Image (cartoon, rainbow, N blue to C red):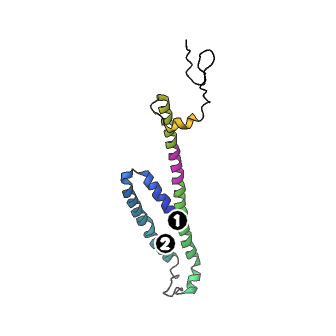
Amino acid sequence: MTQTGINYIAMLSVDRSHRPNALAFLMLTSHLLGDVPLPIILGLIKDKLAPACRVDASGGFIDPEQCKEQEVGVRQSLAISYAWVLWSLLFFELSRRFARREIAKASREERNTLLLQQEDGSGGESTFQYYHSRFQPPVSNQSTSNGESSPLTGSGAMQE
């Protein structure tokens, strides 16, 4: 689930022509900085804090009594691994907030561009005009009895 979101954000962050390279670089760095070294590093930390808690080929502890004495070291190892997960969640949340801010900024800029196109008349028949045309007052095609067009039609010119 998380990898899908990360890949999607990486693809949206670069031009279309650079997307394959961006995904390749993302995959390489995520493996080099995360998947590959983390189990080794956590194993070294556990071996340093609780050296007697080693498992044999059958899956049991080599010296269970000495491992019980080093329970504090095992708990510290687990605390370090949980802190690592919390650290990554903190960065996910920071990046999510930053991305939402950037998306809102881009959305405001897009709306401003559409408004400028509307004012300049350079936009042609755009989505902006279609959307806002639904909020215009109803236009009647009938003219008033004195030859003026209705104020709702917008022409306002008098016919003589």
Q: Position of residue 42 (x, y in %)?
A: 49, 72
Q: Magenta segment: does it hold 3?
A: no
Q: In the image shown, does 112 or 41 lie closer to the viewer?
A: 112
**Disc on the earlier residue, 1 or 2:** 2
Question: Quarter holding the C terminus?
Answer: top right
Q: Is residue 52 above or below residue 96?
A: below
Q: Is the residue marked by circle 2 packed among few (<14), some (14-19), or many (20+) residues within 10 Å?
A: some
Where does residue 98 sit, x and y in percent of width and height?
51, 50
Which residue is disc 1 drawn over?
Answer: 84
- Contact, CB < 8 Å: mark 1 with mark 2? yes
Task: Decide which of 114, 143 is in the foreground and name it.
Answer: 143
**Membership of 102 in magenta stretch:** yes
**Is residue 42 positioned above or below 123 on the image?**
below
Q: In the image, residue 73 lies at what x, y percent?
A: 55, 75
Residues in magenta, as a range: 95-104
Q: Name the mark on residue 42.
A: 2
User: Does 138 sit above or below residue 150?
Assistant: below
User: Could you give the CA–CA distance between mark 1 and mark 2, rounded to whole angstroms?
Assistant: 10 Å
What residue sits 61% from the left and 23% below the top? 142
Q: Residue at x 55, y 72 (%)?
A: 78
- Compare residues 112 and 32 and report the one nearer the observer: 112
Q: Is residue 32 above or below residue 62?
A: above
Q: Is residue 35 left or right of residue 85?
A: left
Q: Secondary structure at mark 1?
A: helix
Q: Position of residue 28 (x, y in %)?
A: 39, 63
